[in-house]
Amino acid sequence: MNFSEFSFWWVLLLFAIPYFTVRYVAKSLNLWRGVFDAVGLAVMSLFLFVNASKSSFAIFMCEIIFNYIMVWLMLRQEKWQAKLIATVVVVIDIAILAYFKYLNFFVEDVLGLVVPGLAETWQSKSIPGMGSIPPGLSFYTFQMVGFVVDSYTSRKKQPIAALDYVNFVSFFPQVVAGPIERRADLFPQIENFRFKLTFDNFESGFRWLSLGLFMKFVLADNISPYIKLDQVDNPWLVWFFAFLFTLQIYFDFGGYSFIAVGLGKFVGVKLTLNFLAPYTSQSINEFWRRWHVTLSTWFRDYVFLPLMGKNMKYAPFYLFITFTLSGFWHGAAWNFILWGAYHGLLLLVLRYAGRPFYKFLGQQKFLMPQFISWALTFGSVILGCLFFMETNTGRLMQKLLVLITPWNYSLSNLGEALTFFNENGAAALVFTLFLSIGLLLMEQIGVWRQGETDYDLLVSPWMSRVLLVLTILFAANTPSPFIYFEF
Amino acid sequence: MNSIDTIQGWLVNQIAKQLGIKAETIKVTEPLTRYGLDSIDSVTIVGDMEDWLGAELPSTLLWDYPTIEKAAKYLVDEAGVSPAETATAEPVAVTSKPKEEATQGKGWGGLWNKISGS
């Protein structure tokens, strides 16, 4: 759901106020049945989804019906029949995703490379579904695929109620942009769903909501206008804008994920934390355990581990392939494939060249070895973000060339970079960066404290109230679109 | 030595061997990625551990329980795994409490370690 849009909150209230009023009255008259909670959640989720995107909702409904029937059949079969059904469902789900998300890219950018004029011919045809990608398709497809596989491998084969399945795949805080929930984590909470409207849940939900709103509306949205993609000549500025984007993408998607966690908690559902203070990482391995956790674990469980099986011989190759595919999941464009491949390559470099380096650092020949590891990791992530932010492949190559040319790092270019923004713009940016660094520092302290989560300080009672006040005071006037909605 | 200590000792040795680092430098409470453990190592170590314990373990064990302490506790307390009498780990210099000098360097590095609690 688009938490930036007023209509989301409006529709939510428009449904929630009469629904919970009726629920309260009916409960006091002893007329309310538990199943009405599950029905209410399903109606609320579907109502919000149709409000968010009618086209995506239509595809979603077809997929829900198809997946539910097939899983229902699968659970009644044994051995190869069950495996066959699972395979068919996964192939069809991925084929639907591929049609809406990758067909254009495949024809225009892959086949178009070898067949001259194909891209133009293709663009002139009006093929249904070839416009923008239906919002949430990548996320709910992955959740449905995961459910099929987990149901197939599960030892318990008892039937699943249709209403429970609808609530599992359409739960409104996370259906459009995750967290991509797994059967073992979410289904037990959703099965025979009952609203748990307690003060503790409300308080806990409010704290996560407050953190998410602050990250999105104050930090991400105030950083966004300063990022200039067309700057290609000055390496200082290229680095700086990549740095700003690195902050923006985390605050944007992290903010979204925490709002989802908060909304989940309001109704008594615990969603998975999609981010675990990723910018505190001291290696790329660690970064990928902290960044977009539910997508990383999805690829680990359904791509990397099955590819590898017991054969460790080609494990490095499979790791590289998994990361490249993960990049491709983000978007049907070369820059996302390059971004995934870059991270896969970094992991391999770290595996084969990084260990001697770690040993070297471990001998304490450097001051602050952990700081060096952190700085190298963060620098690598920033460079990766350059691939991610730049969908124009030609311009991306230009920027990379500028970055690797030593004499571009001249003092005159530095001077130009320092005077790039006017005084007012610079002051607002410095203030936003000050808040951003403050937040990242509190995450780092959270990691050191080893509490329940790395965000313990940021979701403490007093801090969540401070963050809410800061959001009211400094929220950007014009919210920028959620970056991950494009995927 | 109880089951948790035995498993911790085995993991410390195995991780030290896999990563080519000294066992004394490994803290059981530190996330394993801090020592450079990657996805391939995680799966390899769990495979070796299955052979050692003679039990089927989840491949994702070291993701779900990212420190030696957490993994060992899970295996003993939740999965009900206990190392056989004969399957004792090689002795290690450090299990739950690493030597102070292993983590406390000199100068700024040492200060950073103190600040970060590593």
Image (spheres, helix red, strand yellow):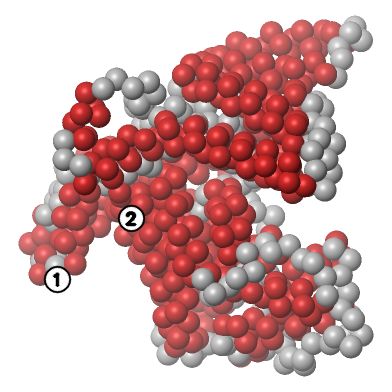
Q: Is residue A88 above or below residue A451?
A: above
User: Can you tell which of label 1 and label 2 is closer to the viewer?
Assistant: 2
The percent coordinates of residue A162 (x first, y second) are 75, 24
Helix, strand or loop at label 2? It is helix
Which residue is the extreme one toward the front? A80
Which sits in the foreground, A347 or A333?
A333
In the picture, measured across the screen, residue A221 lies left or right of residue B19, that is left
Give the tally of numbered discs: 2
Q: Name which of mark 1 and mark 2 comes first in the sequence.
A: 2
Q: Is residue A322 left or right of residue A305?
A: left
Q: Position of residue A449 (x, y in %)?
A: 63, 63
Does A266 sit above or below residue A38? below
Label 2: chain?
A
Q: Residues within 10 Å of mark 1 (few under 14, many from 20)?
A: few
Residue underneath mark 2: A338
**Which residue appears at 39% of the width and 23% of the height?**
A129
Q: Is residue A417 visible?
A: no
Q: Which quadrant does the C terminus of chain A fall into?
A: top left
**Residue A136 pos. (x, y %):** 50, 31
Q: Position of residue A58 (x, y in %)?
A: 52, 18
Question: Where is mark 1, residue-wise?
Answer: A406
Q: Badges 1 and 2: C-beta atoms under 8 Å apart? A: no
Vertically, is A450 above or below B82? above
Residue at the image position 15 percent from the left and 61 percent from the top: A402
Q: Residue at x 47, y 54 (%)?
A: A440
Amino acid identity at mark 2: Leu
Give the residue type that dot 1 points to.
Answer: Pro
